[in-house]
Image (tube, rainbow, N blue to C red):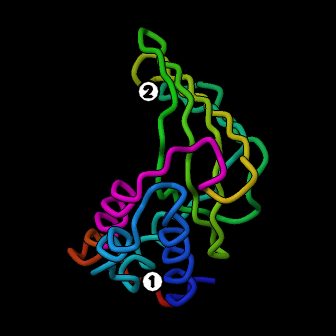
């Protein structure tokens, strides 16, 4: 399902749906989309795709209880954007964030993720839940400027030959 025209369509639609109500002007969106290298971005998206689980535990020590719950999407996905809602730091870092995922079928999904990180990554547990609706109608605060930067960083990694080439 990795097709350049499908990726271009979904990114263009996401950015253009931010015009008006969410507060972006058409000219701003045009500038953010200008220079987007969709061929390279698709290579980066494919490289970074992974199975996303509803619940995980992961530790760095031997004999740690590592666990993967149900496959949340039924297909691999690439994380495009994260919006931190709240967090609390100490020996145990707890946080809640919203995530924007691009699925292999080129659809977008927003998840809410609760993370508990003990001793700076020694043990991490994450729980994810799908939020219904398009990204603009979820609790996520989507910044098109930040998303544009993230997408540019992704395709630039490919252009610098840091990623393998995938046959499409």
Residue 137: say if magenta: yes
Residue 61 pos. (x, y %):
49, 24
State the separation of the CA atoms marked 2 and 1. 31 Å
The disc at residue 166 is 1
Q: Residue at x 72, y 47 (%)?
A: 131
Does the magenta portion include 38?
Answer: no
Q: Residue 25 carries which label?
A: none
**Image quadrant where residue 128 sits:** top right
Q: Position of residue 116 (x, y in %)?
A: 56, 23
Of the pair 82 and 71, the residue shown nearer to us: 82
At 35% from the left and 64% from the top, the residue drawn is 148
**Left or right: 125 as drawn, with respect to 55:** left
Q: 132 or 90, which lies in front?
A: 132
Q: Quadrant of the N terminus?
A: bottom right
In this picture, is 37 found above or below 121? below
Q: What residue is shown at x 40% (from left), y 59% (from top)?
A: 144
Locate residue 96: give its quadrant.
top right
Q: What element carries label 2?
A: loop
Residue 121: assigned label? 2
Please indicate whether residue 115 sits to the left or right of residue 29 in the image.
Answer: right
Considering the whole magenta stretch, tell me its main secondary structure. Answer: helix
Q: Is mark 1 on a helix, strand or loop?
A: loop
Ranked by sequence position, the earlier of labels 2 and 1 is 2
Q: Is residue 40 above or below residue 125?
A: below
- 27 vs 52: above or below: below
Range of the magenta residues? 136-155
Q: Where is residue 9 in the image (x, y as percent from the top left)?
A: 55, 83
């Amino acid at each position: 399902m990795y097709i350049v025209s499908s990726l271009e369509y979904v990114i263009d639609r996401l950015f253009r749906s931010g015009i008006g109500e969410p507060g972006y002007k058409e000219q701003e969106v045009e500038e953010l989309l200008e220079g987007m290298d969709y061929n390279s971005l698709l290579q980066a998206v494919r490289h970074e795709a992974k199975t996303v689980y509803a619940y995980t535990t992961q530790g760095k020590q031997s004999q740690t209880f590592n666990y993967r719950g149900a496959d949340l999407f039924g297909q691999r996905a690439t994380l495009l954007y994260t919006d931190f809602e709240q967090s609390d730091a100490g020996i145990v870092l707890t946080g809640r964030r919203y995530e924007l995922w691009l699925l292999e079928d080129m659809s977008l999904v927003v998840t809410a993720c609760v993370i508990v990180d003990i001793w700076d990554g020694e043990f991490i547990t994450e729980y994810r839940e799908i939020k219904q609706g398009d990204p603009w109608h979820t609790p996520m605060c989507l910044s098109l400027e930040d998303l544009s930067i993230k997408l540019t960083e992704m395709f630039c990694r490919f252009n610098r030959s840091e990623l393998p080439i995938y046959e499409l």
